[in-house]
Image: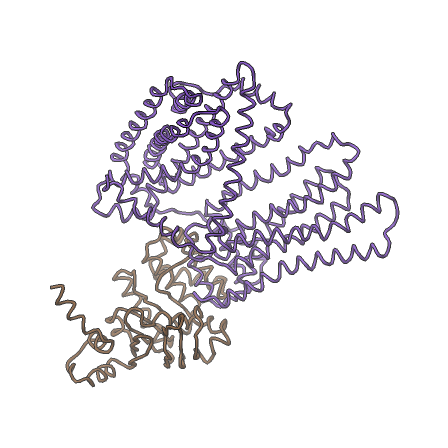
Chain colours: A brown, B purple
Amino acid sequence: MIKLIDLKKTFNGFPAVNGITLKVEKGELFCLVGPNGAGKTTTIKMMTGLLKPTGGKIIIDGNDLQEEPLMVKGIIGYIPDRPFIYEKLTGKEFLKFFAGLFGEEGKTVDDKIERLLNLFELKEWSEELIEGYSHGMKQRLVISSALLHSPKVIIVDEPMVGLDPKGIRLVKRIFKKLSSDDVTIFMTTHNLSVAEELGNRIGIINEGNLIAVGTMDDLRKMAKGGGAYHDMPLLEDIFLRLTGGEELDEVIEVLR
Amino acid sequence: MNDYLYLLQPRFKSTLNILKRYNTDRLVKTVFFGLLGILFWIGIYIIFHRVLLYFRGVQGIGDLLSERLLSMVFLTFFSILIFSNITTSLSTFYISEELNLLLSAPVPQERIFFSKFIETMTDSSWMVLSFGLPVFIAYGTAYHSPFYYYLAIPFILLPFLVIPSGIGITITVFLSKILPARMARNFFFLLSIFAFIILYLLFRFLRPERFTDPEAFGSLVGYFTELAIPASPWIPSYWATKAVLPLLKGGGEGLLFYFLMILSTALTSFIIVGWVSKKYYYDGWARAQEKKSTSSGWKFMESFLSIIRKPQARSLITKDIKTFVRDTAQWSQLFLLMALVVVYLYNFKAIPFDRVPLASFYLKNLISFLNLGLAGLVLTAITSRFIYPSVSLEGQAYWIVRSSPTSLRDFIWSKFWTGFIPLILLAEFLIIVSNRILNVTDFMMALSTVTIFIMTFGITGLGVGLGAIYPRFKFENAAQIPMGFGGVLYMILSMVFISATIVLEAWPVYIIFWVKFIGRALRPSEILIVVLSFFAVILLNFLAFYLPMRIGLKKLEEREI
């Protein structure tokens, strides 16, 4: 469903994404994890057409994003890391506006908006201006908007930021259900436990390079190759090992 | 003291950083507005100097007239400052983003209050003060005052400024006990705009141009003599007048008394506002955090907009209209616009055609023709404020449009039509009504209405296009958007394009009137000139509309976010 072929992006000569090649199957929930500045958001922004790749291709549902941008965007639901939305619209108006951008309107959309508002517990606030919403409520509204047009692919950048535990649980369940309904989900996150819990496969990106891809078992095997981490059960350990974050232990020592 | 000033550091350092990091954009803006400010300054100085010299020459009551004028100046400052302090303090004390940080930090409330007081006073007073300066200099030069007059003015003004700040902030603190701060700010914002409009209209209807006529000065004297300015000895503006007057002539009688009156009142008001804030501020701030609800009375507009076939364009236009209407800072400027229109049309009524009855027919048609340029400039100013920023106003939410399957062509065109339709209605209204007042020929009426129609395409296209070429999605204040490089460039290009249109039409219009005057038909060569000129006008307007829109679209497509 998603193919990234030698995807590159440089900013003033600095390679933010350095030739990523990756294939995500239909209905798969793929998690991309990596330290700050590794290139996660840049990759996602390229996949949603917000940034232009310096090189390579992005193929979604068989269509090249560069050549058929509107067609590809029509089947994507994008959830950014920061919910910047129109503050002077009400929650309901925002969802209607969003549906309109996808060319969808009418009773079916209105019904779906109602269902999503209920699902994300925003019904009570739906006639209030967004400027009065909390960060978490805005995030829930953005997630609702991304689901409005029944996308085939959902691209999510840090979906859990700002959500309360109930919201996090709801989003996890929705993603699992969508994935079982053959919706492909490409997600970046800092939250390794979320990636470990949700991801069918996990990719680790560091300094613009995709350094490891696979299931949790695959990643464990890869990390064991070093020989020192025989019993590492958690993604966190694997992540730190592969991204060179072991010096964290020293930091903790200093803090003591 | 350092502890108290510490909280002002971010503001101070931010200003320093802005000054240090100069770029072309800011330089152009600074030079442009700096020059504008200097011109305005010189204008104020000249007017006051001239009036004061005239007053001084009036036998017997000259000084009384000058005193009344000064008293009026101080009273006006005092009233404006109270108003301005109320609106500013609603922002600085209640709405400002940094308050969350400050009020959650272990900072004593009196320190927050002190820094906010200074901030409010500075923000509210600097403009009044800077425009007051040429008035005081004019007094000094007209009266050949000694140097210490100029030195003493700041010492009188500084405590004088504290008093309206104290009153304004106290009103705000009490007001916020009753109303949420946002609502109160909107209310006062509208009130201040109304007050400004009334002042502006009154000033215009006073016909200040009459005072360029020496005969008219007589009526000015009469006006000031009869004017009943509140001269109560309990008003601080009275003390300020009485403190400044002896200095003007190099004397000092009463100076100390009135200066101490101002100083002690300033200190008292500072103490009172501090006490009031300590008691009531926190409650009001907590209320200011309350959410704002909205009613949904949009059904009519939505059904009207259903004539737009494409759902994408319809959604964008609906969103833009709702956002505009709900932003008080945006739509309230329409009142200013209305005042501008009234004054604009009044100007045509005020032209003294009766003084030149013979030439009046040609003069009226000439003015009607030149009016096209004038209306074009008004439309440019409106476009610069409302239409040029329309792309930038998407702000950080621009990702929504960019990641959706809506084409940027639909996006930019929705911006165009949202701006064009109200603008064309206004343009035609201005032209038709002013032409009716002038009673111009049918030909002139037809020419004006068609030309302004075509020109509005160019003006809007240029505005939307340049707004898309130079978007500022990360703005803090919407009013700053048109003040960037792109905004200034738009103003310049639009003026050039309007002038070119007028110049291109001038020759054929002259030919047509001349032929009519001598009573013969147009020759083939003249018809050719007329047709070519009008064709050139259409071409120029098409280019002014098409090129910026096309380049703007391309720039938006290339732009990464």
Q: Where is residue B35 in the image (x, y as percent from the top left)?
A: 51, 44
Q: Which residue is drawn at 74% across and 48% down?
A: B446
Quarter location, residue B119: top left
Q: Where is residue B320 in the image (x, y as percent from the top left)?
A: 50, 54
Residue found at the very far right of the displayed protein: B520
Q: Residue at x 38, y 35 (%)?
A: B86
Q: Position of residue A48 (x, y in %)?
A: 42, 70
Q: Which residue is drawn at 60% across and 36% down?
A: B343
Q: How many marks?
A: 0
Instruction: Say above or below: A20 vs B352.
Output: below
Q: Nearer the viewer, residue A237 or B257?
A: B257
Q: In which quarter of the image is the N terminus of chain A?
A: bottom left
Instruction: Say above or below: B361 vs B306.
Output: above
Q: Position of residue A35 (x, y in %)?
A: 27, 71
Instruction: Say above or below: A126 vs B179.
Output: below
Quarter location, residue A138: bottom left
Q: Which residue is drawn at 31% across and 42% down?
A: B287
- Horizontal side of B533 relative to A224 (left or right) equals right
Residue found at the very far top of the displayed protein: B60
Q: Which of A195 and B449 is in front in this view?
A: B449
- Horizontal side of B207 relative to B252 (left or right) equals right
Residue found at the very far left of the displayed protein: A256
Instruction: Say above or below: B61 vs B505.
Output: above
Q: Quadrant of the C terminus of chain A?
A: bottom left
